[in-house]
Image (cartoon, helix red, strand yellow):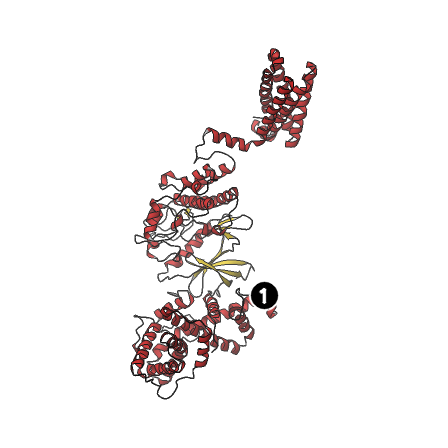
C-alpha cells in the first residue's frame, strides 16, 4: 500500500485486508479476516446455494467451513494479484473447497466448533427468495454482482454511521431519499427534494454534493481494503465505478 | 446489514461515480452522457449560478497524454468563437488529477434524434453546420469527427457543433512535433498524430473503429475513405467536407451512408462500396441537392468541394433559388427554377394572355 | 438598371408585343403598323411613369395599383381616340400596367443605390 503524499483529504490509508491476513500481529490478522469475511460471506453463501445447489443448512455450514479453513490455512497468502482478481481467486478456492467436501462422503466440516462471525444467513436466504435466480451459466457474473452489492452495503453502513456521528442527519436522509429510497423510475428533482425537506434548492445541491463525496470516499476506502495492490485497486475501482484511476491521485 | 435492491446498488454506483469537482467552482448534479474521452455531467456554476455541462476525463491515462489532449481540445474550442460552436467557459484539473472543462449547457436534440422536418428547414440547419465548420477551417482547425451525434439543434433552431476531441490544428503535427504557435495563433503543444495511434481507446468502444492497421479515429459511418483506412496524415479540410456530405445524406435520407459497425473489414468495405444515391431512397429530393451531397462525398478528395465554405455557398445558392456549382441544369430545369422564383410575373403574363384570348373571341362574335 | 429605365424598357417591349397581338384580330389587321406604334408609345409613357413612381415609392401593393391605374387610363385614352374597342384595349392595357408596376417595384436598382453609384 502506497501512502499518497498530499492526499490530506483522505483519512489514514487502510491497509489491504488481504495483505493483513499474513500480518505477524494477531490483532491485525483478526481485523483483516473480519473485513474479508464481512464483504464476502454473502456472495459466497448465495453462490453455494445457486451454483452448487446446496440446501440452506449445508450452505451455511459450507460458508462457515470455507472461511474457517481459509483462516486456518491462510489461503489468502497464496493470492497472486498479477495472475487474477482476488474475487476470481476466492471463487476458485471456494469451488475447490466445496468439491472436496462433496467428495468427503457428504461429511460437512464445521468451522472448528466456533462460528467466526454471526452471519445473517436468514437475511441472505430471504434475499434469495425475493430475487430471481441467475441462469446456470451466469453464476460467475452473479458472484460479481453480489460482491458489488456487498461492498456497497458495507459502505453504506459505514457512511450512515459516519454521517450520524458528524451530526449530518439531514445530509444522510437527503442522500438516502435521492439515491436509495426512490420508488419512482426517475430520480427526484432537486426542486422536489427541496420542498420535501423544506430546504432551499441550493442547500439540497450542497448537501447532496457533500454526501456524495463522502460516500464515494468510503466506497473507495472499502475497495482499497479488499484489494491487495494499487494496480488491483485501480482495476476494481474501474470495474465498480466505471472510472479508471490509473495515474490519478486517489 | 440492510439489503440493497439492484436498483439501489445501481443508483449508489451512479452517485459514487460522479466526479468530485470539489476543487473547482462547479458542483456536479448528474451525468448527462459519455462520449469522446470523457463523460459529460450537468453541473452548477456556484459563482455565477448557472447550469453548465462539465466534461471530465474518464479513460486510462498513465502517460498524461490524454490529459494534455483534453486540455488541447478545450483550447481549440475556446479559440473558435462562433455562434454554432459550443463555447468553453473554463478548464482545469480536479483534485483527483482528472482534467475537466466546463462548457455551455446545450439544450436541444442531437441531430440524429431530431424529428425530421421540411427539406428546406433541414437544409437551413445544414447551412449553419457548414458555416461553423467553415469558420473552424478559416481558423486552421479541422474537426475530423463530424456526424449527427455531434451536432445539437436547439429549441430556437440554433445549431451547435460539439465534440472537437479529435480536431486537428493544421500545420501542426504532420509527421513531426512542432512547438510554438499553431495556425490559430496561440501556442498549442505540438501534438504528433503518432500520439493518436499510441493512445487507446480515444472514444468509447462504440464510437471508435478498431482496425488492425493503424488507429482509426472518428466514426466509420461518416468518415472519408482516407480516414477509414487510417491514413491520418492525409486528413485536411476536404475530409470534413466529406463528413458534411455524409451528414447531408443523413438529413435527406434519414440514415447514415455507411454501416456503423466498426470492424476492420467493414471499414475497408465501406471505402469501396458507395452508398445508394439519396434519390434512390427518396425520389422527392431535388437533383441539385443530391448532386451537392454526392460531390461532397466523392471518394477522391480532388473531386470534392475544396472547403466547407464552398459547400456553404452552394447551399445558400440553392436556398436562394440560384443554380449550384455541383449541378448542371438543363434548359427545362433552368426555366422551371426561374418560373419557381418568379411565380407572380408568370401569373400576370398568363392573365394577359387569357385576356387577349377573351378579347379575341369577343371580337370574333 | 434604375427603375425608371426598367419601366421604360419593359413598357416599350410589352407595348410592341401587345400591339403585334392585334394581328390575331382580322378586323384590325390592316391598321397593324399604326396599332403597334401607338401601343409602343403608350407602353413607353406608362413605363416611365410607373418606373418613376417605383423610384419614389417603395411599396409593392402601391406600385401594382399605380401601374394598373396608369395602364387603364392610357388604354382608355387610346380607345377614346379610336372611338371604340374599349374593352379590347383597356383590359390588356390594365394587365400590362400591372405587370410593369410589379416588375419595377421588385426589380431594378432602388433609388439609394443609384445615387450612391452615381457619386
For this orientation, the residue located farthest to the top is C30
- Label 1 marks a residue whose chain is A
Q: Quadrant of residue C94?
A: top right
Q: Of helix, strand and loop, which one carries label 1?
A: helix
Q: Quadrant of residue B346?
A: top right
Q: Quadrant of residue C83?
A: top right
Q: Give the left or right position of residue A82, taking residue A153 as reference.
A: left
Q: Is residue C84 above or below residue C52?
A: above
Nearest to the observer: residue B132 or residue B13: B13
Is there any visible trace of residue B34 in the rendered image? yes
Nearest to the observer: residue B52 or residue B8: B8
Is there any visible trace of residue A249 in the rendered image? no
Residue A248 drawn at (x, y percent) = 39, 65
For this orientation, the residue located farthest to the front is B365
Nearest to the observer: residue B122 or residue B346: B346
Q: Give the left or right position of residue C45, taking residue A16 as reference.
A: right
Residue B114 drawn at (x, y percent) = 50, 50
Please give the count of numbered marks on the rendered protein. 1
The quarter in which the C terminus of chain B is drawn is: top right
Q: Which residue is mark 1?
A: A192
Residue at the (55%, 75%) spot, across then down:
A169
Residue A228 drawn at (x, y percent) = 35, 74
Residue A230 drawn at (x, y percent) = 36, 70
Amino acid at each position: 500500500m502506497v501512502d499518497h503524499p498530499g492526499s490530506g483529504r483522505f483519512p489514514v490509508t487502510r491497509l489491504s485486508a488481504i495483505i493483513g491476513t499474513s500480518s505477524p500481529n494477531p490483532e491485525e490478522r483478526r481485523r483483516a479476516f473480519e473485513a474479508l469475511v464481512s464483504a464476502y460471506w454473502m456472495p459466497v453463501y448465495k453462490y453455494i446455494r445457486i451454483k452448487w445447489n446446496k440446501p440452506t443448512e449445508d450452505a451455511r455450514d459450507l460458508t462457515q467451513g470455507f472461511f474457517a479453513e481459509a483462516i486456518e490455512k491462510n489461503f489468502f497468502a497464496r493470492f497472486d494479484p498479477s495472475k487474477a482478481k482476488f474475487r476470481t481467486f476466492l471463487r476458485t478456492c471456494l469451488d475447490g473447497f466445496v468439491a472436496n467436501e462433496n467428495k468427503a462422503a457428504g461429511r460437512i466440516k464445521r468451522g472448528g466448533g466456533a462460528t467466526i462471525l454471526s452471519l445473517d444467513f436468514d437475511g441472505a436466504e430471504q434475499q434469495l427468495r425475493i430475487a430471481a435466480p441467475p441462469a446456470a451459466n451466469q453464476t460467475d457474473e452473479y458472484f460479481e454482482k453480489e460482491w458489488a452489492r456487498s461492498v456497497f452495503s458495507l459502505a453504506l453502513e459505514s457512511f450512515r454511521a459516519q454521517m450520524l456521528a458528524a451530526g449530518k442527519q439531514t445530509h444522510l436522509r437527503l442522500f438516502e431519499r435521492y439515491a436509495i429510497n426512490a420508488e419512482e423510475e426517475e430520480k427526484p428533482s432537486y426542486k422536489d427534494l427541496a420542498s420535501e425537506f423544506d430546504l432551499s434548492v441550493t442547500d439540497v445541491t450542497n448537501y447532496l454534493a457533500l454526501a456524495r463525496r463522502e460516500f464515494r470516499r468510503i466506497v473507495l476506502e472499502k475497495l482499497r481494503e479488499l484489494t491487495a495492490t494499487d494496480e488491483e485497486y485501480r482495476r476494481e475501482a474501474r470495474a465498480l465505478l466505471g472510472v479508471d484511476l490509473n495515474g490519478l491521485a486517489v | 446489514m440492510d439489503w440493497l435492491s439492484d436498483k439501489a446498488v445501481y443508483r449508489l454506483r451512479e452517485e459514487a461515480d460522479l466526479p468530485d469537482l470539489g476543487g473547482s467552482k462547479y458542483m456536479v448534479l448528474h451525468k448527462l452522457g459519455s462520449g469522446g474521452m470523457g463523460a459529460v455531467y450537468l453541473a452548477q456554476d456556484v459563482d455565477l449560478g448557472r447550469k453548465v455541462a462539465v466534461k471530465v476525463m474518464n479513460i486510462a491515462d498513465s502517460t498524461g497524454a490524454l490529459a494534455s489532449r483534453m486540455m488541447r481540445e478545450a483550447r481549440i474550442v475556446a479559440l473558435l468563437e462562433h455562434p454554432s460552436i459550443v463555447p468553453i467557459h473554463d478548464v482545469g484539473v480536479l483534485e483527483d488529477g482528472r482534467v475537466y472543462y466546463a462548457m455551455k449547457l446545450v439544450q436541444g436534440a442531437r441531430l440524429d434524434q431530431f424529428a425530421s422536418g421540411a427539406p428546406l428547414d433541414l437544409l437551413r440547419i445544414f447551412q449553419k453546420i457548414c458555416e461553423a465548420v467553415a469558420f473552424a477551417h478559416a481558423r486552421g482547425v479541422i474537426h475530423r469527427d463530424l456526424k449527427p451525434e455531434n451536432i445539437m439543434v436547439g429549441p430556437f433552431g440554433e445549431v451547435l457543433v460539439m465534440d472537437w476531441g479529435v480536431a486537428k490544428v493544421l500545420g501542426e503535427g504532420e509527421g513531426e512535433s512542432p512547438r510554438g504557435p499553431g495556425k490559430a495563433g496561440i501556442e498549442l503543444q505540438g501534438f504528433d498524430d503518432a500520439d493518436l495511434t499510441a493512445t487507446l481507446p480515444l472514444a468509447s468502444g462504440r464510437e471508435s473503429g478498431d482496425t488492425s492497421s493503424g488507429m482509426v479515429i472518428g466514426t466509420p459511418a461518416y468518415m472519408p475513405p482516407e480516414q477509414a483506412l487510417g491514413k491520418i496524415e492525409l486528413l485536411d479540410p476536404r475530409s470534413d467536407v466529406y463528413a458534411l456530405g455524409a451528414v447531408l445524406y443523413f438529413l435527406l435520407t434519414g440514415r447514415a451512408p455507411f454501416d456503423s459497425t466498426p470492424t476492420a473489414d467493414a471499414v475497408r468495405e465501406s471505402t469501396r462500396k458507395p452508398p445508394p444515391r439519396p434519390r434512390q431512397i427518396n425520389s422527392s429530393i431535388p437533383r441539385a441537392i443530391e448532386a451537392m451531397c454526392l460531390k461532397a462525398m466523392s471518394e477522391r478528395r480532388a473531386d470534392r468541394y475544396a472547403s466547407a465554405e464552398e459547400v456553404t455557398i452552394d447551399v445558400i445558392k440553392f436556398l436562394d433559388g440560384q443554380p449550384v456549382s455541383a449541378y448542371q441544369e438543363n434548359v427545362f430545369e433552368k426555366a422551371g427554377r426561374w418560373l419557381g422564383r418568379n411565380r407572380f410575373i408568370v401569373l400576370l403574363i398568363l392573365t394577359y394572355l387569357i385576356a387577349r384570348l377573351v378579347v379575341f373571341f369577343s371580337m370574333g362574335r | 438598371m434604375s427603375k425608371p429605365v426598367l419601366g421604360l424598357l419593359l413598357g416599350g417591349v410589352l407595348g410592341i408585343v401587345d400591339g403585334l397581338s392585334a394581328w390575331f384580330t382580322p378586323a384590325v389587321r390592316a391598321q397593324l403598323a399604326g396599332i403597334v406604334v401607338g401601343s409602343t408609345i403608350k407602353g413607353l409613357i406608362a413605363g416611365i411613369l410607373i418606373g418613376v413612381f417605383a423610384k419614389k415609392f417603395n411599396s409593392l401593393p402601391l406600385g401594382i395599383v399605380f401601374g394598373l391605374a396608369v395602364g387603364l387610363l392610357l388604354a382608355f385614352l387610346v380607345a377614346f381616340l379610336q372611338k371604340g374597342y374599349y374593352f379590347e384595349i383597356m383590359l390588356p392595357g390594365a394587365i400590362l400596367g400591372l405587370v410593369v408596376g410589379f416588375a419595377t417595384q421588385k426589380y431594378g436598382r432602388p433609388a439609394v443605390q443609384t445615387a450612391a453609384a452615381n457619386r
